[in-house]
Image (cartoon, rainbow, N blue to C red):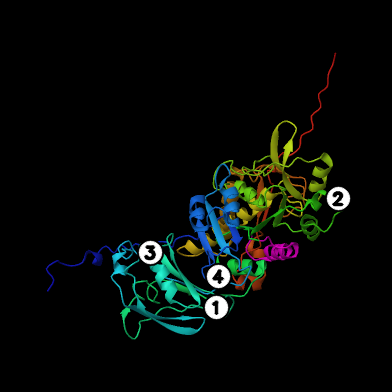
Amino acid sequence: MSTLGLPVSDIVNVQVVLAPLAAQTRDFGSLLILGDSDVIDTTERLRLYTTLDAVADDFGTLAPEYKAAALYFGQTPQPSTLYLGKWARTATAGKLRGGVLSAAEQTLTNFTAVTTGAMKISVDGVEQSLTGLNFIAALNLPGVAAILDTALTGATVEWDAVNQRFVITSSTTGASSTISFATAPSSGTDVSQLFKLRSTNGGYVAPGVIAETPVAAVQALANMSSAWYGLYIAGGAAPTDDQAVAVAEFIEGSGLSRIYGITTQNAGVLNAVTTNDIASRLKALGYKRTFVQYSSSNEHAAASIFGRAFTVEFQGSNTTLTIKFKQEPGVTAETLTASQAVVLRGKNCNVFVRYNNDTAIIQEGVMANGYFFDEVHGTDWLQNDVQTAIYNLLYTSTTKIPQTDAGINTILTTICQRLEQGVVNGLIAPGQWNAPGFGTLRQGDFLPTGYYVYAPPVSDQSQADREARRAPVIQCAIKLAGAVHFVDAIINVNR
């Protein structure tokens, strides 16, 4: 028999219902630098970095990935997010990356106490039984790795001090290049656990792969993650123009909006009669999601454009910008003739160029088809922001959004709230609508808010759409704020 008395809920029953967490918008300030250095493997494929120091720890300061990252992080203000991805430009070797060793597990005496170590491991499909491993003379963990390396055939063993683990790499490359997890030996002191090379130790195996094209690597990373928005390729050898066009084609047609940047050092872009350079080819294809920058001095100059553009905080006030007039720290400005500058402009090729007033600027800040970078970047954000807001309205509603005029008006209100943020950040501004109208909007009308949103009455829906629970088609008109790139001024003088 209870001694607490009757439950209060018999009289007053209160329940707490927590709404689901809203979906997050994408990050439109994240760049992926794709490289071929032997740091990240094709199993891991992608790493996130927030500082250049962290990139240097993994790649050193001579790798192409670091060089591009230095230009990206070298901007002011500084971008906050960078991804580095793996491109298997050449065939890769199979690897076993052991589990991370704690500080206690890294104590040298754990290893030097072993004089009859043993374990089993397979290299390229052939099992090896290692015995008689004596670590007593090791002076440090690289020395421990060297002793295991000597005993192993067809593979190398290294201590990865940055990630605090042992790594075993096959001496061969390609699809048949493999390293298995280690297992216990038939006799001797088992060291597979000591080295954390077992399947249960938190490490992983990365089989070797044959060489892949850049577009294959980009496709793999696109399927793997939606976190990155910009793409720059910084391999030991740059993609050929044909390969770059293939990547641009993929980025253009991908279901998730992204932008691809290319640096060209081909002086043919400065020549009006040359039509087979990368800028001319991409312009002819009309790609709006790829941009090209010419730089004779720096093979990764375009990474700097990403670094400046990706500091935009779209949820802020007056935060949007134009790429023109911006700086590129670490890139030497080009000294061009007026005719060369005109040729680059005609090919929609960007350049960091010197002016005769002792300044240097990026110009023109355009994509291959002539669209301005900030327009593509900003409207990509707006599309995702509106899409996510409508989704969250439907997703977080504890009841439903009715298929009535009042319910549709709730959706319109949500859209207007997000378009208003476009006004606040400077993407959208009041102006004249100079395109065909819809709803009550007519060509030539002035948009005092910078936007107009319209949905027809629910009563006008077809029965099929109503039964399918579709909202009427919602149409939005927005007027971009644009940016001033050129000024003509006339000074009239009267004596």
How far apart are labels 4 and 1 at the CA level?
Answer: 13 Å
- Residue bearing the label numbered 2: 272
Instruction: Determine the residue positioned at 53% across, 65% down.
Output: 40
Question: What is the x, y in percent for residue 148?
Answer: 41, 73
State the separation of the CA atoms marked 3 and 1: 26 Å
Give the residues drawn in magenta, as a range: 237-257
Mark linked to residue 141: 3
Disc 3/disc 2 C-alpha distance (Å): 59 Å
Q: Is residue 116 above or below residue 339?
A: below
Label 2 vs label 1: CA separation? 49 Å
Can you see residue 75?
Answer: yes
Indicate which disc, 4 or 1, sits on the residue closer to the N terminus: 4
Q: Residue at x 59, y 41 (%)?
A: 318
Quick check: is 355 in the magenta stretch?
A: no
Q: What residue type is labelled 3?
A: Leu
Image coordinates of residue 21 in percent, x first then y, are: 44, 61
Comparing marks 4 and 1, which lies closer to the viewer? 1
Of marks 3 and 1, which one's residue comes earlier in the chain?
Answer: 3
203, above or below 257, in the image: below
Report the magenta stretch's main SS.
Answer: helix
